Image: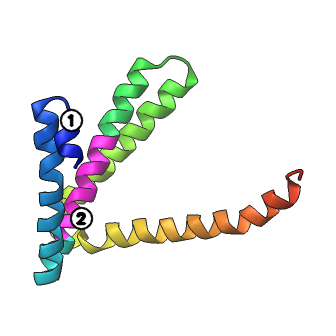
Amino acid sequence: MDAWKAEAKSSRVATGLMPAGFLIGALAVVFDPLAGLAAASLVVVALLFAGGIGRIVEGLRRSGPARVWRIAAGAASGLASLVLLASFPATAPWPLGSLAGASFILDGLSRLAAPAEDAKAPP
C-alpha cells in the first residue's frame, strides 16, 4: 500500500485517509443517492476552486503573454466555483452531468480525429 511507502508522516496519513474517503463517498451514493450526488458536486466545486487558485499562482510566477491567460483561467475557475457554491442545492446535479457530457464529446472528437492522424503518419 502506498500509504506505508510515503516518507513523511503527514503523507502517510493523507494517503491512508483517501481510501476511507472513497469508501464513505461510495456508501453515500449507494444508500442515499441524492446525498452522494450533492457530496460529489461539492468535491467538483472544491477541485474547481483549488485548480483556479493553482492557475493564478502559476500565472503570477510566469512572465510573458502566458501569464495573463493563466491568471484569467484561474480567475474564471474560481468564479465558476463560487457561483456553483452560492446556489449549491439547486446546482448539485448539473455540474457532474456537464463535465461528463463534455468528456464524452471530447473523447468522441478525439476518436474521430485519430484515424485522420493515423492516415497522415508515415509508416
Q: Residues within 10 Å of mark 1 (few under 14, many from 20)?
A: some
Q: Residues within 10 Å of mark 2 (few under 14, many from 20)?
A: many
Which span of residues is magenta-colored?
38-51
Q: CA distance from mark 1 to mark 2?
A: 29 Å
Q: Which residue is mark 1?
A: 6
Classify residue 20 as left or right of residue 64.
left
Q: Position of residue 81 (x, y in %)?
A: 28, 52
Residue at x 44% of width, y 36% of height = 72
Say whether residue 113 is magenta.
no
Classify residue 120 as left or right of residue 79.
right
Q: Quadrant of residue 13?
A: top left
Q: Position of residue 102 (x, y in %)?
A: 49, 66
Q: Quadrant of residue 40?
A: bottom left
State if disc 2 and disc 1 touch (CB < 8 Å): no
| Residue 10 appears in the picture as rendered | yes
Residue at x 50% of width, y 33% of height = 69
Residue at x 11% of width, y 34% of height = 10
Label 1: state its secondary structure: loop
